[in-house]
Amino acid sequence: MNERTCLAIILAAGQGTRMKSALPKVLHTIGGLTLVGHVATRMAAISDAKLALVIGKGQELIADAVRKISPTASVHIQDEQHGTAHAVLAARSAIEEGYDDILVVFGDTPFVTDETIARLRAGIAEGAAVTVAGMEPDDPAAYGRMITDGDDLLAIREFRDASASEREITLCNGGLMAIDGTVALELLTQIGNDNDQNEYYLPVVVEVAVKAGHSAGWVAVEEAEILGINDRAQLADAESRFQTARRQQALADGVGMIAPETVYFSHDTQLAADVMIEANVIFAPGVRVEAGAIIRAFSHLEGAAVATGAIVGPFARLRPGAKIGPKARVGNFSEVKNADVGPGAKVNHLSYVGDATIGARANIGAGTITCNYDGYAKYRTIIGEGAFIGSNSALIAPVTVGKGAYIASGSVITGDVSDDALAIGRGRQVEKPGRARTMRERAGQKKQARN
Ligand code: UD1
Ligand code: MG
């Protein structure tokens, strides 16, 4: 636990025009969580940090995404985007509350680690006025260049303002920094906009601090941790890095995968050891799978819990609220939504089970549909333990099928069925002896007459 107090300012204003999207850049997702959600999660993990979020006008959706993670985050509007230092000063009222450390992080830099944050803060605790995370990217491109003297950081030059020799520098500004809270406002308000874009650049705080007789430091961080996402290609690259890391983590945790490169995780996917996953499985947000369960190929799971020993798929879809009990089965082309499938129950083929409770060991025959929606409201279907639902039955909810009851195949069940009863809801079969032959003969004669 850090004794020092900390304000983490997340900069997220602006649309991020290079995304070419109606959605603000930081609301695009990696592993099913928004970019700004990833950053807020990391910042909220610093137990003593207060969060401040800077957004543009009309970007309340960004505030919602952050408040979901940190309800106490303060939200500050930067009316017009005049640069990263200008953005930090939009959170001036939060800085004025007085903190030992001011952290500035970008909403488009989702992979920052707690360790880097701790190192930046340690630099401030040891006397630096500013500490900055630096990286040596494969392609330094248009990143700001860091001018250093050993461990001392002297200045950061934006690429477009850098001289030819400064552009040769390979150490780049990762955008993440800590500032001594006791001098932060004094330094930030001295930053001018005398540059190529007439913007107030946050990295200029380094030069301002050094000129005022303070020291500034830097910590080296892997590019993968602080890469900023500015366009769709960088977003896709970040998603792929995230997936690779999650697959490796799952394998290390004892999850079995025959083709890990085809399995997609969400930020919050929870898989126990000895879960087995076949190829081409997608875990959308909110999925938990217990030990010994098998997820077969081409299944899509979202907001679902799968208990130990259950088998899901191939080609199954679990939607939010699906709870698959121990040793239960959900097979090919079955969909389960907002429903409990009891221990050992089977929904093996081509069924829709929505807003339902299925008792232990019940068998849901192929093609069974719970008709849960009348176009206006949703209704529940309750199926008792050990019940047998014959193939191609339609259960018109609200409806209850008792324990051990038996529904004849092809039934349309509109009323409750008692325990151990047999219910048949279909037209009775009629048989006409020899009639098929008569029909054939007549048809043959007609055809001959025509020729
Ligand atoms: C910034 C750094 C650069 C660094 C790079 C690392 C500056 C001036 N440059 O450049 O040195 O190498 O990050 O990724 O800081 N934002 C606002 N309001 C503004 C401007 C920006 O909130 O007025 C937010 C953006 O939403 C974004 C973040 O600040 O989340 C960074 O802005 P961006 O335009 O991406 O800066 P870069 O050009 O990447
Ligand atoms: Mg950027």
Image: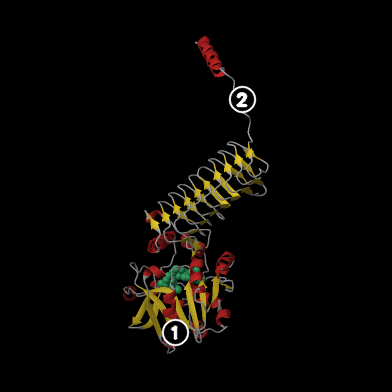
Q: Position of residue 349 (x, y in %)?
A: 50, 43
At label 1, the amino acid type is Ile
Q: Earlier in the sequence, mark 2 or mark 1?
A: 1
Ligand 1 neighbours mark 2 (CB distance < 8 Å): no
Q: Position of residue 437 (x, y in %)?
A: 53, 16
Ligand 1 neighbours mark 1 (CB distance < 8 Å): no
Task: Say above or below: 344 vs 221.
Answer: above
The quadrant in which residue 436 appears is top right
Q: Which residue is mark 2?
A: 430
Work out whether residue 62 or residue 41 is closer to the camera in this orientation and state it.
41
Q: Which mark is residue 112?
A: none
Work out whether residue 387 or residue 378 is closer to the camera in this orientation and state it.
387
Residue, x 38% and y 64% (percent of image)?
252
Task: Say above or below: 114 vs 324.
Answer: below
Residue, x 60% and y 39% (percent of image)?
407
Q: Which residue is mark 1?
A: 124
